[in-house]
Image (spheres, coloured by chain):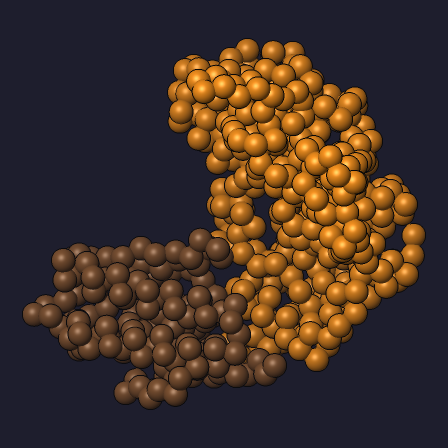
Chain colours: A brown, B orange
Amino acid sequence: MQLDDLYRRVIMDHYKNPRNKGRFEDGGVSIDLHNPTCGDRITLQMKVEDGIVKDSKYVGEGCSISMSSASMMTDAVKGKTLEEALELAEKFSALMKGEDVEFEYEDLEALSGVKKFPARIKCATLAWNALRKGIEQTQK
Amino acid sequence: MNALEIRKLFPILNQEVNGHPLVYLDSAATSQKPVSVIEAVKRYYEWDNANVHRGVHTLGSRATDAYEGAREKVMRFLHARSTQEIIFTRGTTTAINLVASGYARNICKEGDEIVITPMEHHSNLIPWQQVAKATGATLKYIPLQPDGSISLADAEATITDRTKMVSVVYVSNVLGVVNPVKEIAAIAHRHGAKMMVDGAQSTPHMKVDVQDLDCDFYALSGHKMCAPTGIGALYGKKELLEVMEPVEFGGEMIDFVDLQESTWKDLPWKFEGGTPIIAGAVGLGAAIDFLEEIGLDAIHGHEAKLAAYAMERMSQIEDLIIYGPRDRSVGLITFNLGDVHPHDVATVLDAEGVAVRAGHHCCQPLMRWLQASATARASFYLYNTEDDIDRLVASLLRTKEYFGHAIG
């Protein structure tokens, strides 16, 4: 078992220097999600205009995998339509299932190592589950 | 007690995990099983398996004898007065729920109080929350001291004449404290309240005497004390069990059934609806034999020594935070390694074959009290050695280095 497969440099960089951390002062869609089995939690906020994710922020508590995944996700969805964001979430699920996928936002590929650590997949997917909920809520 | 010899009796421990000999430090979640327990369950299925309390045939008698024999062992093990006071359950959770639903719900009314502590496992918290909601009773908490222990003065101040039920964990699965449940039971009784003890973490590790504690109810889980999963027991004083209502109805638990009315069997069977967990009970009986042969005092002594050694070694690790009192006689240590998230700690340790628990340990309110979203926990049992703790400490140091390097 190679730990470096899991904790790649780019993951550690997102963990240590999180992108998009914080809250919007003026609303937007807000999703609170936590993982009851381990206590990780995230609040994801998105500003959606004309079906496009204009901006996205998050705050949360969790391990390096869950927080770096949130950092990358909030970066990756910016400027995407809701459909594209949902496709991205599908692609990320495929990555976790061990499929070979490429991302325009390349940092995400660093998370491919998580699939070898089944206990940690739920960490990586927390932010993406929040994204799916956020999209659902917007489309209601 | 020779832990190295005992270890050989646990087949699962003799394996490599991720290229390293397994160091299992998660016995507070579930213990491993000795070969005698595995064999007892196997022998039961290969020779004696039949349904209990009904067959006229030989296997039926053997299965019944095995099942009721296990009940006698639990009775002796807890020093209960009679087998009528021992009800087999799925585990501690089911036992506490049975008392909450079958007893507390019927005696609590608006204005009454139920008293617990903030260190309770969810299984000794939510059932009481539910009783409080259903009856209008108030759920009160004995506050914790800064080090996580309970003071009797606080217990005195919290328990009042309105209190109907007190339920406290004997040994905390996070803080490693042993609570003064005997003294709390005495306070409860002075106010006319009943006392339940959550024995999930105490029963595997120390001698328990329910008559000496004078608790009214006591719950245990088999799987934490070398028995299979899915079996546990509730001890209750006979006079209370007699007024307690069954919550599961069906086969096994009835005396006489008519179209509109039915009556229940005597204790303890009125609480054991359906075909019981026979093989599990046989396994629990074998686990009790195993633990008694080694001796609970010897096991407790061994774990206290390990805890002291682990405390000494771990407190030398810079940035390592240990939760709960420093002095402890039970073998579990909950900690955090600086800023490294406990999941990351547990993953790095696992890569070196060291199994620890990470998360909230089913104690979300306690985690909030500790101001930690999650923690890591190493817990020891009779098969652990000082070498295991050395491996833990070495792996923790490497984790620190790895994350220091990766993050720094």
Q: Is residue B215 left or right of residue A53?
A: right
Question: Could you say which quadrant of the image residue B384 lies in?
Answer: bottom right
Does residue A102 sit above or below B198 in this rendering? below
Does residue B322 sit above or below B248 in this rendering? below
Does residue A64 sit above or below B95 in this rendering? below
Does residue B17 sit above or below B55 in this rendering? below
Taking depth in this image into account, of B138 and B287 the one nearest to the observer is: B287
Q: x and y percent of residue A101 in the render?
A: 35, 87
Looking at the rendered structure, the number of numbered marks drawn on it comes to 0
Q: Residue at x 67, y 22 (%)?
A: B267
Residue at the left extreme of this rendering: A50
Is residue B365 visible in the rendered structure shown here?
A: yes
Q: Is residue B195 left or right of residue B203?
A: left
Taking depth in this image into account, of B29 and B43 the one nearest to the observer is: B43
Q: x and y percent of residue A19 in the render?
A: 33, 73
Q: x and y percent of residue A35 in the render?
A: 42, 57
Residue at the front extreme of this rendering: B57
Q: Residue at x 20, y 65 (%)?
A: A135
Is residue B366 visible in the rendered structure shown here?
A: no
Taking depth in this image into account, of A121 and B59 the one nearest to the observer is: B59
Q: Which residue is drawn at 70% across and 32% down?
A: B53
Q: x and y percent of residue B43 in the render?
A: 79, 53
Q: Which residue is drawn at 36% across and 79% down?
A: A94
Q: Is residue A21 left or right of residue B60?
A: left
